[in-house]
Image (spheres, helix red, strand yellow):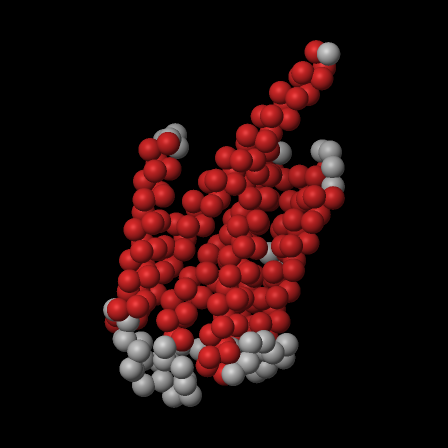
């Protein structure tokens, strides 16, 4: 099935509806009064329903970088290089937002924005820096080697994704964990958040891929005009 403008409109509409639903549910539907030992900021708990989906979609985006990079090295098709580079850019944006929302939640809950000894914060920061380095590498390498070198770096950088995910189980982790009892309303809201942010990711990925394809077409036209002159 070919992707059409109608599919883009449907994706955009679904994203907007679920984001609005998430905003409503996080304000009026969730339960803030359930007993959570050691938690002190129930109002700031609303950030949880954005922070967790942001982190999930960041991991998803870097997973797509990994898959697209492998696909490029196997097929040498430029479309996979475009998918990998655009997904990395969106992933860096989502990771930035996840770090910001996490810091705000941590300040309200634990009275600090950042602590380097927190294993989750440290490994997520390294993950963020790895994909910023990926983007810098793409900007610095020219010619045919650009896509190949970027693909190798994108594959290697993926190792930080599982490290970031499992770091919350480290003895040095100070990261808040979800309570054993989670009201059904909160679980549903979290699910809506994951769906909403996943749809947002794919919308942003589509936009960036479209821009990159236009840029590539303009480069081809420019080269043909220069050759004709």
- Callout count: 0
Give the percent coordinates (x, y) of residue 20. 31, 56
Residue visible at 65% across and 58% down in the picture: 130
Q: Residue at x 74, y 37 (%)?
A: 142
Q: Nearer the viewer, residue 113 or 127?
A: 113
Q: Is residue 176 above or below residue 29?
A: below
**Quadrant of image for the N terminus:** top left
Q: Is residue 149 visible?
A: no
- In front here: 142 or 29? 29
Q: Quadrant of the C terminus?
A: top right
Residue at figure coordinates x 53%, y 35% from the top left: 211
Which of the 4 image quadrants contains residue 222? Answer: top right
Q: Position of residue 137 (x, y in %)?
A: 71, 47
Looking at this rendering, what residue extends furthest in the top direction?
A: 228
User: Looking at the picture, does residue 54 appear above or below residue 166?
Assistant: above
Q: Give the vertical position of 51 relative to 87 (above or below).
A: below
Picture coordinates of residue 61 (x, y %)?
51, 52
- Residue 124 appears in which quarter of the rendering? bottom right
Relative side of 96 to 10, left or right: right
What is the residue that sits farthest to the bottom in this orientation?
A: 37
Q: Position of residue 120 (x, y in %)?
A: 56, 72
User: Taking 34 as reference, is 127 left or right?
Assistant: right
Q: Is residue 107 visible?
A: yes
């Amino acid at each position: 099935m070919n992707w059409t403008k109608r599919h883009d409109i449907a994706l955009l509409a679904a994203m907007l509806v679920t984001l609005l639903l998430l905003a409503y549910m996080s304000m009026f539907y969730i339960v803030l009064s359930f007993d959570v030992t050691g938690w002190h900021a129930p109002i700031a708990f609303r950030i949880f329903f954005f922070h967790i989906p942001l982190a999930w979609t960041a991991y998803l985006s870097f997973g797509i970088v990994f898959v697209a990079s492998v696909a490029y090295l196997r097929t040498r098709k430029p479309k996979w290089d475009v998918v990998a580079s655009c997904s990395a850019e969106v992933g860096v944006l989502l990771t930035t937002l996840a770090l910001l929302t996490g810091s705000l939640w941590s300040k309200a809950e634990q009275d600090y924005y950042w602590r380097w000894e927190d294993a989750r914060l440290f490994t997520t920061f390294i993950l963020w820096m790895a994909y910023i380095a990926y983007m810098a590498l793409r900007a610095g390498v020219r010619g045919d080697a650009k896509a190949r070198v970027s693909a190798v770096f994108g594959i290697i950088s993926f190792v930080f994704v599982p490290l970031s995910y499992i770091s919350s189980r480290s003895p040095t982790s100070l990261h808040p964990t979800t309570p054993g009892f989670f009201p059904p309303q909160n679980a549903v809201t979290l699910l809506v958040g994951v769906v909403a942010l996943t749809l947002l990711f794919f919308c942003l990925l589509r936009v960036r891929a479209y821009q990159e394809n236009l840029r590539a077409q303009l480069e081809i036209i420019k080269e043909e005009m220069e050759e004709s002159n």
